[in-house]
Each structure stands twice: as C-alpha cells, then as structure tokens.
C-alpha cells in the first residue's frame, strides 16, 4: 500500500504550491503516471480522499493520465509506444530493447485553482 | 471566480529522489558499492545475504548490511552471525524502504564508516511492488525470484523487474521437485529487462555463488 505514501507526497507538494495563491481553492490535481510506475489508480484515489479529508484540499479531484511505455530501438532507431508492459520489443523489427524513453513517470503535471475575483485597488472609484 | 492553472511538472517523489541522489554521491565518494535487494517475502533474500556476507568476510572484503522489515529484528540477528555489521530498519507497517530511512540509519551506526566498506547491502521489505518507486541511492538494484514462485513473476511485476540491474534466481537446489521451468523463467526475465545479468543460485548449497562474487568484485572496482 505505498499509494498512501504517494498520496501524502502529493498533498505536501500541492499544499506548498497552492500556498502561493492565498484564498485559492484547489479544484483539480493532474498527474502523469507511467504504466510501469506501479501505482494502482483506484487505490491512489481512495488514499487521496483519505489524505485530504478535513484539510483545505478536501474535495479536490485527482485527474490521472496514464502514459504508455515508449522504447527506443537501437536496431532501427525508431521509438515505439508499446501496448502493454509484458514485453519490451520494438514493434517494427521485433528486437528486444532496454532503452526506455517513457513509462516510469510519477509526476504532478499541474493544479487547477479557483480564485475569488480580485477587486483591484483604486479601480472602483474610477467607474 | 476565476480559474488558474499552475504548471508544476514536479516528481511526486522528488524529495526522496533528491535525498537518494545525495546518498549516491556520498556512496560514490566513499568508494562503497551499494546494492538494493528486492523480492517477495520468503524468496530467500536473507539466506542469500547470509551466505554473501559470510563469504565476502572470508575473502577479506568489508561488507555491511541494512535490513528492512515491517517488524522484528530476526533478519538482522541472522545476518549478524556472519560477523559483518548489520542494522535493522523497522518500518512499522510501511511496505518499502525510502531514502530517508537509509540516511537515518547510516547516521550513528556504531563502528561503521562508509569509507571503510567495500560493500553495503540493503535488504528491502519483502514486496515486489512498492520498493520499485523508491530510489535508495543504490548503484545496483537486484531483483530476486525463487524457483517456488512461478516463472511468470517478472511478467506480473514488470515495474520492479524492468528497473533492476541484476536478477537472482534463488533456491535452485529444489528446482527439480518444484518443476521449475528454467528456460521459461530466463525468457520472461529477458522479455521484461532485456540483457540483464541473471544469477542462478542456492544459498543452501552455494551453487552459482562464484559467478555472483565475480560480478560483485568487478562492479566494486573503481572505474
Ligand atoms: N532449499 C532452499 N531453501 C532456501 C534457500 N534460501 C532460503 N531458503 C528458505 O526459504 C525461506 C525464506 O528465506 P529467507 O531468507 O528468510 O527469505 P526472505 O524473506 O526473502 O528474506 C526460509 O525457510 C529459508 O530457509 C535455498 O537456497 N534453498
Ligand atoms: Mg528477510
Ligand atoms: Zn526496431
């Protein structure tokens, strides 16, 4: 159950980033997870709710984008996106390759904040 | 209300990765080869390490081990019998070791100085999933698999096997009775991590250990 540790790390990063925008509420946290990242999505969603309950992040959605494995083939120089994680072969020439170009990501891509509209100082008087 | 998108592009485990990078630098400058051993519970990590530590000591190499378990210091006591310095890390429910635990247990490890060691082995918590995301600053990650576990383990846990630098098949002394299909296991390992070095060993009889020691010696040589 390392999803709990992962969720806790996300909470920490997001709280820190959102802290720079006082008054803002975090609506969505977007993640990029490689197919090899060994994270179970349902389990992470569950742990996210658990970790954010009762905090300013409560109710924020976790939007997860799963990235397929991409390997580079030394034989033909091609990069191929693989369908699964059961075999690391170039789809073009069938060669096995250990040169991974995508698939291990464990990343917070962005956060979406909702901010109260600011009433700029001095603007009121001018209208 | 207005919506604002803030791009972060930040590794979720950035803190661990940074700590691990610091440890790696420390290990490199101390000239100690660090290996992280990962497998299911019961694969034979402790037995394999017992034999490894004992044998390295006998050859005059200085080796030490950190051993992670949810609870108990049984493994540390087993490994300590080799005479090598061993320290237990109890994670109390956490299913993997992380870089912070390693850093904490290196500090104040009585009588152990990294610069005096040739090898530091880290036995991770028995688990094939969670440890694969946590860099411990090791130079070599070793995935272990016993002949009793089924030849398709690498296919079931590609996240770990794909991140490994070496693989060890353990308990080959009982491969026969277990109906272990060696060719299939090797093929599956190679399918997930093409070109990886594989050692076929028995901690009980010592079979296959010579290759492993030759590999360790070659890896420990300053390049
Ligand atoms: N026959 C045989 N049994 C082994 C071997 N290595 C370990 N075992 C047994 O497998 C069980 C688990 O071993 P252990 O080293 O504690 O596994 P760990 O949980 O991965 O550390 C123990 O009962 C060991 O005696 C081996 O090479 N041959
Ligand atoms: Mg053990
Ligand atoms: Zn190709």
Image (spheres, grey):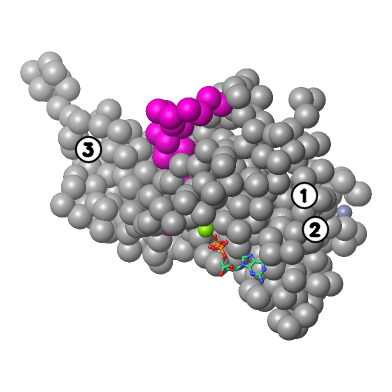
Q: Is mark 2 within 8 Å of ligand 1?
A: no
Question: Which residue occupies the foreground of this view, A32 or A115?
Answer: A32
Task: Give the structural element (helix, strand or loop) at label 1.
Answer: helix
| Residue placed under numbered mark 1 in the picture | B212
In magenta segment, residue B19 = no
Do marks 1 and 2 both belong to one polypeptide chain? yes
Determine contact: label 1, label 2, CB under 8 Å. yes
Q: Looking at the rendered structure, which numbered label has been put on residue A2?
A: none
In the rendered structure, which segment of residues is drawn in magenta? B95-114
Distance from the alpha carbon under mark 3 to that under mark 2: 61 Å
Q: Is there any visible trace of residue B41 in the rendered image?
A: yes
Distance from the alpha carbon under mark 1 to that under mark 3: 56 Å
Distance from the alpha carbon under mark 1 to that under mark 2: 7 Å
Task: Give the structural element (helix, strand or loop) at label 3.
Answer: loop
At x 78%, y 29%, the residue is B221
Q: Is mark 3 within 8 Å of ligand 2?
A: no
At x 41%, y 53%, the residue is B73
- Badge 3 crowding class, 10 Å Cα cut-off, few under 14, some 14 to 19, many 20 or more, is some
| Residue placed under numbered mark 2 in the picture | B208
Q: Is residue B115 left or right of residue A121?
A: right
| Residue placed under numbered mark 3 in the picture | A24
Question: Which residue occupies the foreground of this view, B3 or B81?
Answer: B81
Do marks 3 and 2 both belong to one polypeptide chain? no
């Amino acid at each position: 159950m390392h999803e709990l540790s992962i969720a806790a790390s996300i909470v920490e990063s997001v709280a820190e980033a959102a802290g720079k925008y006082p008054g803002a509420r975090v609506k969505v946290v977007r993640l990029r997870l490689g197919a090899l990242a060994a994270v179970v999505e349902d389990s992470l969603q569950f742990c996210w709710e658990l970790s954010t309950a009762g905090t300013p992040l409560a109710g924020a959605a976790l939007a997860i984008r799963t990235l397929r494995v991409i390997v580079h083939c030394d034989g033909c120089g091609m990069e191929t996106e693989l369908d699964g994680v059961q075999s690391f072969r170039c789809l073009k020439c069938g060669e096995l390759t250990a040169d991974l170009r995508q698939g291990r990501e464990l990343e917070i891509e962005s956060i979406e904040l909702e901010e109260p509209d600011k009433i700029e100082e001095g603007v009121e008087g001018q209208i | 209300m207005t919506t604002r998108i803030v791009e972060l592009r930040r590794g979720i485990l950035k803190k661990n990765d940074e700590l691990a990078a610091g440890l790696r630098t420390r290990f490199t400058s101390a000239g100690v080869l660090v290996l992280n051993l990962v497998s299911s519970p019961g694969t034979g990590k402790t037995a394999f390490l017992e034999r490894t530590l004992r044998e390295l000591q006998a050859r005059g190499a200085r080796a030490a081990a950190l051993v992670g378990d949810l609870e108990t210091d049984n493994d540390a006591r087993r490994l300590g019998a080799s005479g090598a310095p061993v320290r237990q890390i109890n994670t109390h429910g956490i299913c993997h070791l992380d870089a912070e635990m390693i850093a904490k247990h290196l500090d104040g490890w009585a009588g152990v100085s990294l610069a005096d060691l040739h090898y530091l082995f880290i036995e991770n918590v028995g688990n094939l999933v969670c440890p694969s995301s946590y860099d411990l600053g090791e130079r070599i990650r070793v995935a272990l698999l016993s002949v009793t576990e089924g030849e398709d383990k690498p296919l079931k846990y590609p996240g770990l096997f794909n991140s490994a630098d070496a693989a060890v098949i353990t308990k080959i002394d009982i491969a026969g009775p277990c109906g272990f299909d060696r060719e299939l296991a090797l093929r599956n390992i190679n399918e997930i991590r093409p070109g990886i070095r594989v050692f076929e060993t028995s901690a009980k009889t010592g079979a296959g250990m010579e290759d492993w020691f030759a590999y360790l010696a070659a890896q420990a040589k300053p390049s």
